[in-house]
Image: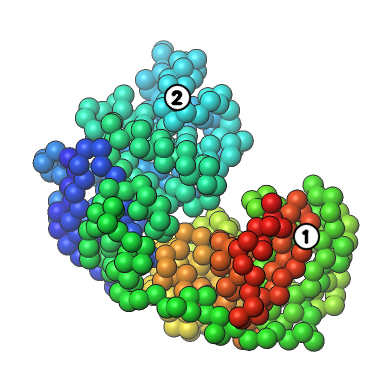
Amino acid sequence: MFELRNVEKRYPGVHVLKGVDLAIAPGEIIGLVGENGAGKSTLMKIIYGAVQPDAGSVLIDGAPVHFRSPRDAMKMGIGMVYQEQSLIPNLSVMENIFLGFEQQFVHLGVIQWRRMAQAARVQLRKVKLDIDPGMITSRLTFAQRQLVELAKVLALEERVEGHLVILLDEPTSVLSKDEIDLLFGLVRELRRRASFIFVSHRLDEIIALSDRIYVLKDGIVVDVLAAKDARVETIQKKMVGRDIALEYYRENRQVPFDAGRVLLELDHVVLPGRRHEVSLTLHAGEVLALVGVEGAGREGILRAIFGLKAPERGTIRIRGEAMRTFSASNSVAHGVGYIPRERKIEGIASGMNVYENMTLSQMGRYSRGGVLDIPAERALARDWIKRLSIKVPSEESDCGNLSGGNQQKVVLAKWRSGGSDIILLDHPTRGLDIGAKEDVYDMVRDMSADGVGVILVADTLEEAIGLSHTIAVIKDGEIRTWFNCQPGAKPSLYDLIHHMV
């Protein structure tokens, strides 16, 4: 019912898609996988009409179509559920569902809100979400917003004839297991009215949900697999073109930290909304992982260290100096760098180029009399692009157009080039493919070897165990126990879970 034939796309200096063919049948779920930078995002944008191909054809039911915008694609029954979510937070749920299509509820120039609410309830029932359509969207949980995104796409049913094609871009990246099970159950139920293209770096989920899997590498479809016959290891090898290293977390590069050099101390710190005290010490070259269930308080500790929230009691010391002022700028001035979970929102400045992002936290070094030394900024960026193997046409490229893994490298370069020796990593590999994760693990080992202290909130327990020197297990805002993680004597998953729940 939907097909791409020999699709090509180039940007200055980069051949992104090279003769891509893709076909999807009614009710079929297609998995789309590839490393960051393989061309997945561009391919999705072409399908959704946000980008036009340089060559090739898009066909629906065998007839060629041309999308000049996402609105054209939506009129033909193609919708997208975004990884970063496209809902406008200060609008109501029903306004978001019918954004751009409000005219159907207008009478004599006035929107009939009751009719809109009634129509929104119909869409919300499709995704089994029982909420007030008039609720402001910012009050919803992430999982609820994800379902509203899906309801918004399903509203196309009443506006178009024929089958829908729904693109799911990393829809599970920050969902719990129960929320993922709910989403997958809905997708399977909706197959009678829609086909799906599912993009995810969680290969086990791709195999569980998909019928067929397209593997993209360097802009080429290198294989199409039947999901029932696919294995995670096989897909990984096809994605990266090699076997994944047995030393996945680079434990062979783990060296003892400098126990005599303390970079950071939390002394009986009580955070807002918590009642337990938190005390910890971070040494030069140490990787300290904070583990716990969602909501245990790990992220709050990172944000307090970075000055985004002030403790109610206790003391935070950086290199022995007690912090009196809590702000991001003060923490940056004291050598603290923060790589947040939401890198596209808090990590990079989309619309600014690579060298501007890298020097954003150290503008004073590149300013003379209020005039920026742009050649020096560009030289620094070129150096770090080479050091971290950042895939980018040039240092002048828009950071918002880079893949997730390369954006993460730019954020890391911003702090490392500025001399930060305390780095806070909040889910640094979230949404990254297998190859990009390996790059991040190498960077963590490089920082440790350089004497940088790292506090890590990992994406998985295996990642925390593999990367860390020390693990603090947090439950209900309290550090319950500590583990020493020397190579060859690391704790098991059960050891951690026993104290987490």
In the displayed structure, would residue 269 be above or below residue 87? below
> Residue 438 location in percent, x, y?
46, 74
Instruction: Give the amino acid type for the residue marked by disc 2 in the picture.
Output: Arg
List the single residue furthest toward the top: 108
Residue 315 visible? The answer is: yes
Q: Quadrant of the N terminus?
A: top left
Horizontal side of residue 34 vs 318, given as left or right: left
Q: Mark 1 and 2 residues: CB-CB less than 8 Å, in contact? A: no
Of 119 and 178, nearer the camera is 178
What SS does tag 1 mark?
A: strand
Residue 423 visible? The answer is: no
Residue tagged 2: 125
Quarter residue 445 falls in: bottom right
Residue tagged 1: 480
The figure's colour scheme reads rainbow
Tell me which residue sits at (39%, 58%) in the image: 203
Q: How many marks?
A: 2
Instruction: Give the amino acid type for the residue marked by disc 1 in the picture.
Output: Arg
> Residue 89 location in percent, x, y?
55, 39
What SS does tag 2 mark?
A: helix
Q: Dot 2: within a 10 Å radius of its alpha carbon, few (fewer than 14), some, or many (20 or more) residues?
A: few
Of 280 and 307, nearer the camera is 280
- CA–CA distance in space, label 1 to label 2: 42 Å
In the displayed structure, would residue 29 be above or below residue 199? above
> Residue 9 location in percent, x, y?
23, 61
Which circle's residue, 1 or 2, is located before the other in the chain? 2
Quarter residue 421 falls in: bottom right
Of 291 and 85, nearer the camera is 291
In the displayed structure, would residue 404 be above or below residue 184? below
Horizontal side of residue 260 vs 493, given as left or right: right
